[in-house]
């Protein structure tokens, strides 16, 4: 291990959370380094470059609000921005605020440990290649020291590779949606098979079908997907939004999802069948994430009400897919609408009526193993030239636990979270002083407009760090009681809805052996903001400050001044 140098704070991750955290830490005068495993900024939007990758939050909402000049000068081209456009926006932000001078690219944080005597984090950093990979366990590392360690690693960044026998035996191209090649992949004249029909799969499938000789979709769990109705933005609507951005953003900060939508005032049972269908139809055609689920007060809490919305969506599927042998496989069943991440798509269901697309129901015909020339099921071998794994992520905790920091008394975070990711406000964990998570488990995060949640969390964490500095304290961490009370709140809020019935990655259900704990906070970004603000206003009653002041110790390693 090679000794590096010390700074006041280290941020892990160069996506939207990491970039904004750097901006805010600069404002309070802290020397900060950001380590990013990739070659440039962007985070999730650097790696997720598969065909059709785009955000499901409208572009005029999915952008920073902290700088008025920034939001006035940037021009989005479509209702839902594509991955290249979002990455270009991230690059613009990095250049505009001169962020790269404090960022180190192709550097992966591979370990961190808290020194109780010094009240310092020791952070191990290894060089990574252009694909963000470290060469192996024996790779040389540099050790950096910092008082504060902030994980801005993203909720959807740790690739989930399915445990399918023989996966390495396939002789063709294997592609994963979260690790897509940088060069364009040509599927012309090729037989392609895809496993996974979640958010990534629904975006990939239509575009691959247009180019491949034949596409086979291996389908297990039908998901709810609604039409995005994407289109170019008009000059008039962009001008109107920019004119009212300040007011609109304030509404977003106190809304339910971080995107202002009308708050429902009536139950689905308070209206006639005709009126219910009209409201459902309007929400279906809106192309806005969460609009249909928010069309009545009880769709997330009452199983019968939810069933009406679910059946409406299934009818829409059958309107497109007339063949019942296909529609009954892809019709969303087995989960309540909204308890798994719903998708917004462009011609997803329409793809299944194409002549060059085949559908395999894995519930009736399970995969036995991958072989050199394709996928072996109980019915035989599905031959293919390319295999796409659209199997998503070890969401919310995967990237954090890959680093597995070591806290007070030598406890590893993996051990501390063995029964589930327990945090206070999603921002910190007991026995891990001065360690902060941006949009961590126990915060709205993936149930919200992530940019709104990132800004709120970054600002709250930075204000807390500033408070630690003002007190002259050595460290801060959640109290055990405060942490347990908060996670009970997170559970109780979810239990009041239908969310706990869903077999979803919100619960870690897609990862074998992962504790089944509902991770996001479901009661909305507005309520979460109020709770967070109250905690700060009341002088952080659920946090423990170590104010046992000792002579200040330099965070610089001798002979390695920055």
Image (cartoon, rainbow, N blue to C red):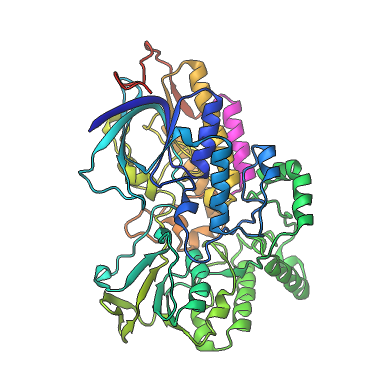
Q: Quadrant of residue 275?
A: bottom right
Q: Is most of the magenta stretch helix, strand or loop?
A: helix
- Quarter of the figure with residue 175: bottom left
Can residue 482 be seen here? The reply is no
Stretch in magenta: 522-540
Q: Quadrant of the C terminus?
A: top left
In the rendered image, the residue lying farthest to the top is 551
**Residue 26, percent from left and from top:** 53, 27
Q: Vertically, is 28 above or below 397?
A: above
- Give how far across and how far down residue 87 sits, in percent: 53, 51
Residue 531's place in the image compared with 365, above or below, is: above
The residue nearer to you, when weighing 274 against 150, is 150
Is 523 inside the magenta-drawn segment? Answer: yes
Q: Visible in this render: residue 66?
A: yes
Name the residue: 57% across, 59% down. Answer: 82
Q: Residue at x 35, y 22 (%)?
A: 119
* Quarter in which the N terminus is drawn: top left
Q: Residue at x 49, y 22 (%)?
A: 468
Q: Is residue 120 above or below residue 82?
A: above
User: x, y (%) of residue 384?
Assistant: 35, 79
Q: Position of residue 140 (x, y in %)?
A: 23, 39
Residue 369 colored in magenta in the image: no
Which residue lies at the image location 71% right of the left edge and 59% below the top edge? Answer: 233
Residue toward you, 228 or 321: 228
Q: Nearer the viewer, residue 394 or 490?
A: 394
Left or right: where 508 falls relative to 249 = left
Whether residue 549 sits left or right of residue 89 in the image: it is left
Front position in the image: 98 or 207: 98
């Amino acid at each position: 291990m090679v000794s590096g140098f010390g700074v006041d704070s280290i941020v892990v991750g160069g996506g939207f959370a990491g970039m904004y955290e750097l901006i805010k830490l600069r404002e309070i005068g802290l020397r900060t380094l950001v380590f990013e495993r990739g070659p440039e900024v962007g985070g999730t939007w650097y790696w997720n470059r598969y065909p059709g990758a785009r955000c499901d939050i409208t572009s005029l909402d999915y952008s920073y609000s902290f700088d008025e000049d920034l939001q006035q000068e940037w021009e989005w081209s479509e209702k839902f921005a594509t991955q290249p456009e979002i990455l270009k926006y991230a690059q613009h932000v990095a250049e505009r605020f001169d962020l790269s001078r404090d960022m180190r690219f192709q550097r992966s944080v591979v370990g961190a440990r808290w020194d109780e005597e010094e009240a310092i984090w020791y952070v191990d950093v290894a060089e990574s290649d252009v694909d963000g990979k470290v060469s192996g366990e024996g790779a040389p590392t540099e050790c950096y020291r910092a008082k504060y360690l902030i994980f801005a690693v993203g909720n959807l960044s740790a690739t989930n590779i399915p445990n399918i026998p023989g996966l390495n035996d396939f002789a063709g191209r294997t592609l994963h949606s979260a690790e897509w090649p940088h060069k364009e992949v040509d599927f012309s004249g090729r037989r392609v098979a895809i496993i996974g029909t979640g958010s990534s799969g629904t975006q990939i499938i239509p575009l691959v079908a247009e180019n491949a000789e034949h596409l086979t979709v291996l389908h297990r769990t039908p998901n709810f997907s609604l039409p995005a109705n994407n289109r170019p933005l008009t000059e008039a609507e962009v001008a109107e939004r920019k004119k009212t951005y300040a007011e609109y953003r304030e509404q977003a900060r106190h809304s339910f999802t971080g995107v202002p939508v009308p708050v429902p005032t009536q139950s689905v049972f308070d209206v006639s069948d005709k009126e219910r269908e009209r409201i459902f139809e309007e929400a279906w055609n809106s192309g806005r994430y969460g609009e249909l689920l928010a069309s009545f007060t009880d769709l997330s809490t009452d199983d019968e009400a939810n069933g009406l919305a679910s059946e409406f969506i299934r009818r829409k599927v059958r309107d497109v897919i007339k063949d019942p042998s296909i529609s009954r496989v892809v019709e969303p069943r087995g989960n309540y609408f909204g308890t798994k991440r719903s998708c917004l798509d462009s011609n997803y269901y329409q793809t299944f009526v194409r002549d060059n697309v085949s559908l395999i129901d894995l519930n009736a015909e399970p995969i036995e193993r991958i072989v050199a020339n394709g996928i072996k099921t109980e019915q035989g071998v599905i031959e293919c030239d390319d295999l796409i794994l659209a199997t998503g992520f070890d969401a919310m905790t995967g990237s954090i636990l890959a680093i597995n920091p070591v806290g007070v008394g030598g406890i590893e975070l993996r051990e501390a979270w063995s029964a589930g990711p327990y945090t206070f406000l999603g921002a910190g964990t007991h026995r891990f002083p001065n360690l902060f998570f941006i949009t961590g488990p126990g915060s709205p995060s993936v149930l919200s407009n992530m940019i709104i949640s990132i800004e709120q969390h970054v600002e709250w964490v930075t204000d807390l760090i500033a408070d630690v500095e003002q007190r002259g304290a050595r460290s801060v961490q959640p109290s055990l009681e405060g942490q347990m009370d908060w996670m009970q709140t997170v559970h109780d809020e979810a239990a009041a809805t239908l969310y706990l019935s869903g077999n979803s990655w919100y619960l870690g259900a897609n990862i074998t052996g992962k504790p089944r704990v509902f991770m996001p906070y479901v009661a909305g970004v507005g309520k979460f903001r109020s709770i967070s603000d109250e905690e700060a206003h009341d002088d952080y009653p659920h946090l423990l400050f170590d104010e046992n002041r000792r002579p200040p110790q330099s965070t610089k390693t001798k002979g390695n001044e920055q």
